C-alpha cells in the first residue's frame, strides 16, 4: 500500500494528487451523485418543477415490462458474448501454445482486433450480415434461409453478439496464452510420462490451472458486454428492430438523452452503477489474477 | 574527518515500540566504529538515525559541533553503503558515482576528476560506462563504495555491506574496507551481525542488545573482559562456555556435585562461570578440574573442537585443542581451566563480577 | 509440446489459420467493398476481390468527406482522433504517475480517502452518468472543444494502480540512497522514478492510445459541431442516413482508415502492448 520510507512534505503531495482529484470530483463523483439525486425526483412535463418521490422511479422501472425485457436481453446478450469470445479465444490459445513454429506470427495475426473500436467492429459485421451485399447475409438468403436483421429481432441480436465477441477474442487470447505459458513445463512432462495424452492432460491439468484466468476473463467480458458494447449497438441496429437489441446501457442513453425522461433514466443509471460496482468489487476481491507473462 | 556525538539518543516508533533506549557515545575523528548485535537489536535503526533516514525521538546527534537531529540526510555530509548496494539501475557506474556531486552543483570538470580518482582507488576505472546490471556482486559492492567515497564525506556509514557476498569475497572486501578507511582517515560507522567482521574491522565496537548498548570498547577489551554474559556469548566463536556453580564460602560445586579445585569469588551463592574453549586444556586425571565424556569431535584443520558432556549440565562444554588425537569419541577425558582466563557473572543480572 | 504427433501439430496449424481467416475476413471484405464503385454494390452482388477504385474512393473520402451525411473530410476526423488519443493517453499517464507518487511516497491526511476516491472512478463509466456529465460539460463551456473531448477522460484508477504497483516493487534503498545523495522529492521523481518507469509508461501509452482513439459515446455527447468529430463516432453519422442504405464503399473506407492507426500501434509495439494489457489488470 505504501512505502515505509517516505518524504516529509506538507504541500507537495496535495499538489500531486490535485489534478486527478479535481477531475474525479467534477466529472465523476459530482455527476454520479446528481444521477443518484435525480433518481429520487419526478419532473413535471415542462421541466419547471420537480418533486421528491423516494423510490417511485425505481418501483415504476421494475413494474415496466420494457425495462424488465431489456434486463433479460442484456443478460442473454452478455453471457452469449462472453461465452463466444472466451471459448473461441481458449481454443486458439491452446492451438497457438501447441505450435512451436510461427507462434509469434500467429500471435500477431490474432491480437490486432483488440485495436479495432467496438463501433467499427459493429460496422464490419453489419456489412457481413447485410442481406443483400454481405457474404453471410446474402449467402444465407441464397441457401434459402431467410436472413434480414433489419426486420428479425433475433437475427439482429446474433449480429451484435458476433460483432461484440469478435472484438474481444484478442483480449481473451492474450490472457489465455499467458496463462498457458505460465504453466510449468515439468508438470506437463510429468503427466506425459504418467501416460496422459494431450486431451487427457488438458482436462485434468491444464484446464484446472487455467480456471482462475477463465474466471477472471468471464468477469471482464461481462463488464465489457454490459457497458462497452454500446457503440456496437448504436452504430448498427440502434436498439432495433422493435427494441430487440436494446440492452440496458442503450436504454439508459435512449431514455435520458433522446427521450428526456430524467428521473427514469437516472434511476436506470443508479441500477447500472450498482451492477458495475458489484462486478468491480467482485473482481478485486475474489478473482485471482495469477497471470504472469 | 569528524567526530560524531550521541547524547542519550532514543527512538520510539509510532506504534509505541521503543527501538533504541538511549545511547551515549563519542566517536572520535577517524575512528572505525562497528555496531554489532543479533537481528532486531536496533543496530540498523541506530545507523539509520545517524544517517537521517529515521527520525530521532529524543536526545541529540552531533556531527562535529553541529546538531543534526533535523537535518536532511543529504545535508549531513555523510555517505552510506547499503546492504543491497542501492545502485540506480538506469544510470551507468559513472553517473551513479557522479549523482550526488551533480546535486551539489559541482562543475563538470571537478566531477570528472573526483569520480576518476575514486574509481582509481577502487580499481573500477574500466567499469565506468557499464550499468549496474552488467556487474558482478563484488563489482557492485565497489561501485557502492565508490559512490560513498567520491563525495569525501565527514562520515561513512555501512549497513551490512558484505552480507550479500560469498564467503571468499567477503573476507577480501573486509580487508579492503579496512585499508581504505585507514588510508582516507574518514570516520566510519559499520553495522553487522557477523562478529568476525566486527572484531577484525573495529577500532571500537558497540555490542547492541534489545535497543541498548551492552558494552562499548575495543575488540580485545570486549573479548578479554566482557561486561555481560550476552557480550561474552556473542563475541568469540565458538562461544564462551557457561557453567552454573554453587559457592559455599570458597568452595565451588558443579550442578553434578563435582567440586572444582579452585576458589571462586565469595558473596554470591550462585554464580555463572565463563570459560572460552581455547582456555581449557586436556590434562591427566590428577590435575583435572573437570571430567567430561566426548560426544562429538569437530576437526577444523588447524585445531579441533571437542564437545564434552558432563552430568548435571544441560549443554556440552566446548574445548578447543590443537591435537584431536588426544581423545576418541565416547571417551572420558579430564580438562583443566586456565585460572587467568576465568570469567564470573551474576546469574541474576547477567553482569560481570570483578 | 511434449510428444511429437505430426497430425496433431498439422491440425493445430490448420485451426489457427482458419481462426485467423475468420477473424480477418470482415476486414478483408470491408476493404474489398471500399474499393468498389457505387454501381458494384447493388443487391445480389457480393464482391470478394478488390475493385479498381481504391485511390478514387479513399482520396474522395479523405479530403472531401461524404457529402450526403454532412460529414467532414475523414482526414480532419483522423486528426481529431489523433489529438484526442494522444491527449488522453498523455494526460492519463501524467496525472496518474504523479498521484501514485504522492500516494506511495508521502504520508498526508486524507491519503487513504483520496485513494478510494480514485478507485471509485472504476465504478462510474460514462454510460452510467451520461446526462449529468453532459450538463457539467455544457456548463463549463467545454462542448465542441478538444478540452471537452479529453480532460474529463483523463482520470484513471487503472493507471494510478499500475504505477502504485510498480513503485512498490522499487526497493526502499533507492529513495534512501537518493536522499543520502541530497535529492529532494522532485529530483528523486525526475531523476530516478521517471527513468525507471519508462517501460511502464510506454506500455501504458499503447493501451491508453487505443482507449482514447476508440472512444465513442463521449465524443458523441460533447460534439455537435462536425469539425470536432472523431473517426470512430463519425462513422455512425454516415451509417445512420435516414431512409436509405449507407453508402457502403465510403463507410467501409472510413472504417478501414479508422482502424489503421491503432492497429499499427498494436502490431508494431506488440511486446509493450501485451505487457501493458496484462499489467493494467493486476
Image (spheres, coloured by chain):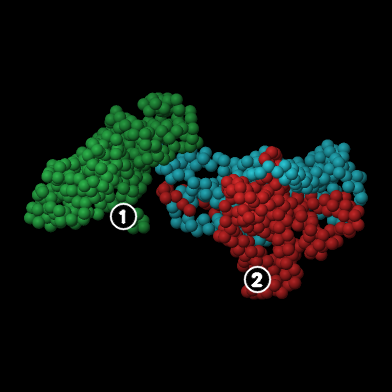
Chain colours: A red, B green, C cyan
Name the one closer to the observer, B332 or C254.
B332
Element type where label 1 sits in the image: strand
Q: Is residue C90 left or right of residue B240?
A: right
For mark 2, what is the residue?
A41
Q: Nearer the viewer, residue B147 or A271?
A: B147
The x and y percentages for residue B239 are 25, 45
User: Image quarter for residue B149?
Assistant: top left
Task: Please name whichever residue, C91 or B98, is drawn nearer the observer in this view of the structure.
Answer: B98
Rate crowding at label 2 as few (under 14), some (14 to 19) or many (20 or more) other CA atoms within 10 Å: many
Query: Closer to the camera: disc 2 or disc 1?
Result: 1
Taking B69 as reference, is A230 above or below it? below
Residue at 88%, 50% in the rendered image: A133
Residue visible at 86% across and 41% down in the picture:
C49
Residue A84 tag number? none
| A158 sits to left or right of A97 | right
Would residue A167 be visible to someone looking at this image?
A: yes
Query: What whole-number distance in Å separates the C-alpha atoms at marks 2 and 1?
Result: 58 Å
Residue in the picture at 40% in, 30% down: B106
Residue B196, how many percent across, how many down? 29, 39
B129 up-or-down from A97: above or below: above
Horizontal and vertical percent for residue B35? 29, 43
Horizontal side, residue B279 vs residue C151: left or right: left
Above or below for B295 versus C109: above
Which residue: 79% across, 56% down? Answer: A159
Residue B18's disc is 1
* SS category of the residue bearing label 2: strand
Amino acid at each position: 500500500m505504501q512505502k515505509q520510507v517516505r518524504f516529509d512534505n506538507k504541500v507537495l503531495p496535495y499538489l500531486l494528487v490535485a489534478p486527478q482529484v479535481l477531475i474525479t470530483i467534477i466529472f465523476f463523483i459530482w455527476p454520479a451523485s446528481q444521477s443518484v439525486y435525480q433518481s429520487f425526483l419526478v419532473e413535471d412535463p415542462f421541466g419547471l418543477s420537480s418533486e421528491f418521490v423516494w423510490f417511485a422511479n425505481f418501483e415504476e422501472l421494475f413494474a415496466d415490462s420494457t425495462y424488465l425485457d431489456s434486463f433479460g436481453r442484456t443478460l442473454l446478450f452478455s453471457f452469449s458474448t462472453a461465452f463466444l469470445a472466451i471459448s473461441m479465444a481458449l481454443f486458439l490459445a491452446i492451438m497457438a501454445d501447441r505450435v512451436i513454429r510461427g507462434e509469434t506470427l500467429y500471435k500477431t495475426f490474432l491480437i490486432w482486433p483488440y485495436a479495432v473500436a467496438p463501433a467499427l467492429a459493429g460496422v464490419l459485421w453489419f456489412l457481413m450480415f447485410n442481406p443483400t451485399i454481405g457474404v453471410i447475409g446474402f449467402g444465407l438468403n441464397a441457401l434459402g434461409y431467410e436472413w434480414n436483421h433489419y426486420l428479425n429481432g433475433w437475427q439482429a441480436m446474433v449480429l451484435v453478439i458476433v460483432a461484440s465477441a469478435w472484438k474481444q477474442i484478442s483480449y481473451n487470447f492474450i490472457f489465455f496464452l499467458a496463462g498457458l505459458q505460465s504453466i510449468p513445463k515439468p508438470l506437463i512432462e510429468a503427466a506425459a510420462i504418467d501416460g496422459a495424452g494431450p486431451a487427457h492432460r488438458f482436462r485434468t491439468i491444464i484446464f484446472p490451472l487455467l480456471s482462475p484466468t477463465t474466471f477472471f476473463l468471464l468477469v471482464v467480458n461481462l463488464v465489457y458486454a454490459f457497458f462497452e458494447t454500446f457503440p456496437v449497438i448504436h452504430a448498427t441496429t440502434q436498439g432495433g428492430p422493435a427494441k430487440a437489441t436494446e440492452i440496458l446501457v442503450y436504454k439508459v442513453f435512449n431514455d435520458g438523452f433522446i427521450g428526456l425522461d430524467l428521473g427514469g433514466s437516472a434511476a436506470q443509471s443508479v441500477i447500472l452503477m450498482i451492477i458495475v460496482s458489484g462486478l468491480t468489487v467482485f473482481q478485486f476481491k475474489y478473482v485471482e489474477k495469477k497471470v504472469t507473462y | 574527518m569528524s567526530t560524531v556525538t550521541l547524547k542519550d539518543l532514543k527512538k520510539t516508533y509510532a506504534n509505541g515500540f521503543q527501538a533504541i533506549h538511549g545511547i551515549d557515545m563519542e566517536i572520535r575523528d577517524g575512528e572505525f566504529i562497528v555496531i554489532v548485535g543479533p537481528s532486531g537489536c536496533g543496530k540498523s535503526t541506530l545507523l539509520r538515525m545517524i544517517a537521517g533516514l529515521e527520525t530521532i525521538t529524543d536526545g541529540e546527534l552531533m556531527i562535529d559541533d553541529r546538531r543534526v537531529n533535523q537535518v536532511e540526510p543529504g545535508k549531513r555530509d555523510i555517505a552510506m553503503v547499503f546492504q543491497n548496494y542501492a545502485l540506480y539501475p538506469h544510470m551507468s557506474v559513472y553517473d551513479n558515482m557522479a549523482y550526488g556531486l551533480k546535486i551539489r552543483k559541482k562543475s563538470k570538470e571537478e566531477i570528472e576528476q573526483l569520480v576518476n580518482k575514486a574509481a582509481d582507488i577502487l580499481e573500477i576505472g574500466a567499469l565506468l560506462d557499464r550499468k549496474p546490471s552488467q556487474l558482478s556482486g563484488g563489482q557492485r559492492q565497489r561501485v557502492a563504495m565508490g559512490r560513498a567515497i567520491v563525495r569525501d564525506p565527514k562520515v561513512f556509514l555501512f549497513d551490512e555491506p558484505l552480507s550479500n557476498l560469498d564467503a571468499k569475497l567477503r573476507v577480501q572486501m573486509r580487508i579492503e574496507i579496512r585499508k581504505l578507511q585507514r588510508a582516507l582517515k574518514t570516520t566510519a560507522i559499520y553495522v553487522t551481525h557477523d562478529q568476525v567482521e566486527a572484531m577484525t574491522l573495529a577500532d571500537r565496537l558497540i555490542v547492541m542488545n534489545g535497543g541498548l548498548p551492552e558494552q562499548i570498547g575495543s575488540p580485545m577489551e570486549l573479548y578479554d573482559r566482557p561486561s555481560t554474559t550476552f557480550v561474552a556469548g556473542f563475541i568469540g566463536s565458538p562461544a564462551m562456555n557457561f557453567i552454573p556453580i554453587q559457592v559455599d564460602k570458597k568452595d565451588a560445586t558443579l550442578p553434578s556435585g563435582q567440586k572444582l579445585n579452585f576458589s571462586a569469588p565469595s558473596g554470591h551463592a550462585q554464580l555463572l562461570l565463563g570459560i572460552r574453549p581455547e582456555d581449557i586444556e586436556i590434562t591427566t586425571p590428577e590435575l583435572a578440574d573437570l571430567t567430561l565424556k566426548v560426544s562429538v569431535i569437530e576437526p577444523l584443520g588447524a585445531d579441533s573442537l571437542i564437545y564434552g558432556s558432563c552430568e548435571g549440565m544441560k549443554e556440552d562444554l566446548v574445548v578447543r585443542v590443537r591435537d584431536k588425537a588426544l581423545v576418541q569419541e565416547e571417551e572420558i577425558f579430564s580438562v583443566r581451566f586456565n585460572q587467568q582466563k576465568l570469567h564470573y557473572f551474576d546469574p541474576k543480572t547477567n553482569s560481570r563480577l570483578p | 509440446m511434449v510428444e511429437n504427433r505430426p497430425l496433431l501439430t498439422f491440425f493445430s496449424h490448420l485451426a489457427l489459420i482458419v481462426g485467423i481467416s475468420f477473424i480477418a475476413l470482415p476486414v478483408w471484405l470491408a476493404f474489398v467493398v471500399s474499393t468498389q464503385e457505387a454501381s458494384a454494390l447493388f443487391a445480389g452482388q457480393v464482391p470478394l476481390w478488390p475493385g479498381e477504385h481504391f485511390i478514387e474512393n479513399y482520396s474522395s473520402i479523405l479530403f472531401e468527406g461524404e457529402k450526403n451525411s454532412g460529414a467532414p473530410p475523414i482526414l480532419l476526423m483522423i486528426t481529431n482522433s489523433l489529438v484526442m488519443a494522444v491527449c488522453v493517453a498523455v494526460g492519463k499517464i501524467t496525472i496518474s504517475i504523479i498521484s501514485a507518487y504522492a500516494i506511495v511516497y508521502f504520508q498526508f491526511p486524507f491519503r487513504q480517502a483520496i485513494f478510494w476516491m480514485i478507485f471509485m472512478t472504476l465504478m462510474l463509466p460514462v454510460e452510467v452518468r451520461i446526462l449529468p456529465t453532459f450538463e457539467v460539460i455544457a456548463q463549463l463551456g467545454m462542448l465542441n472543444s478538444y478540452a471537452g473531448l479529453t480532460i474529463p477522460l483523463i482520470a484513471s484508477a487503472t493507471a494510478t494502480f499500475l504505477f502504485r504497483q510498480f513503485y512498490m516493487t522499487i526497493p526502499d534503498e533507492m529513495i534512501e540512497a537518493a536522499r543520502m545523495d541530497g535529492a529532494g522529492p522532485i529530483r528523486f521523481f525526475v531523476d530516478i522514478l521517471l527513468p525507471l518507469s519508462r517501460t511502464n509508461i510506454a506500455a501504458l501509452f499503447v493501451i491508453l492510445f487505443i482507449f482514447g482513439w476508440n472512444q465513442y459515446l463521449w465524443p458523441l455527447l460533447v460534439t455537435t459541431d462536425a469539425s470536432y468529430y472523431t473517426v470512430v463516432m463519425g462513422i455512425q453519422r454516415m451509417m445512420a442516413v435516414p431512409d436509405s442504405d449507407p453508402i457502403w464503399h465510403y463507410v467501409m473506407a472510413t472504417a478501414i482508415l479508422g482502424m489503421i492507426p491503432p492497429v499499427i500501434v498494436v502490431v508494431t509495439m506488440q511486446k509493450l502492448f501485451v505487457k501493458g494489457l496484462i499489467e493494467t489488470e493486476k
